[in-house]
Amino acid sequence: MDNKGNISLEFFYKKCKEHNLKITPQRATIYEALFNNKTHPSADAVFQRVRKKIPNISFDTVNRTLISFVGAGILKMVESYGRPKRFDPDTGNHHHFRCLKCNSILDFIDKGFDSLAVPKDIQNRFTITGKKVVLEGICNSCRK
């Protein structure tokens, strides 16, 4: 992975090795299903893609694998506020815009948001491990 958060097989292999995750054909196929995917797919969407290559794979296997990838830092989880969790292969620093109508999630980068200060009260009460901004509204496609 480069500094822009691009995914690669090299990054995948490195992270699996660091976290003692055996590289199986199923795991590699699940990871490959996320290559250059900017839609932040749900576990079900990944399952539908993977099932085309591995017809007998179970949803549970895909879901557990995605969760283990998040734990290993291979993916980020994007909460969808009452909807199924979605997954982001871009582990670089970026933020999200979520359309309230079609539920699409789009990435954006903004140095101003990157440098937002965490309130002292929050710093005193919690250990902050990261921060991201999620903007919500209506995308251009839905506005038309």
Image: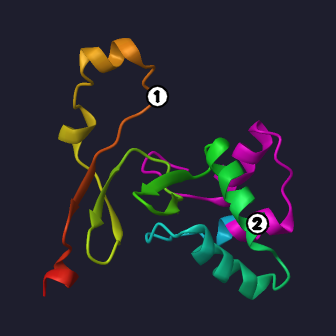
Disc 2 or 1, which lies upstream in sequence?
2
> Mark 1: which secondary structure?
loop
| Side (left or right) of 110 relative to 43 | left
Total count of labels? 2
- What span is in magenta? 1-30
Amino acid type at image mark 2: Asp
- Residue kind at label 1, given as amino acid type: Thr
Residue at 65% over, 81% down: 49
Residue 127 figure quarter: top left
Question: Which is in the foreground here, disc 2 or disc 1?
Answer: 2
Give the crowd class for mark 2: few <14, some 14-19, many >=20 residues within 10 Å: few
Asked whether 13 falls inside the magenta stretch, the response is yes
Q: Which residue position is annotated with label 1?
A: 129
Q: Is residue 15 magenta?
A: yes
Figure colour scheme: rainbow
Q: Nearer the viewer, residue 17 or 141?
A: 141
| Rendered residue at 39%/15% (across/down) | 125
- The image quadrant where one finds the C terminus is bottom left
Find numbered disc 2 in the image and state the secondary structure of the residue it sits on: helix
- Res. 60 mark: 2
- CA gap between label 2 and label 1 equals 28 Å
User: Is 138 drawn above or below residue 126 in the view shown?
Assistant: below
| Left or right: where 2 falls relative to 124 | right
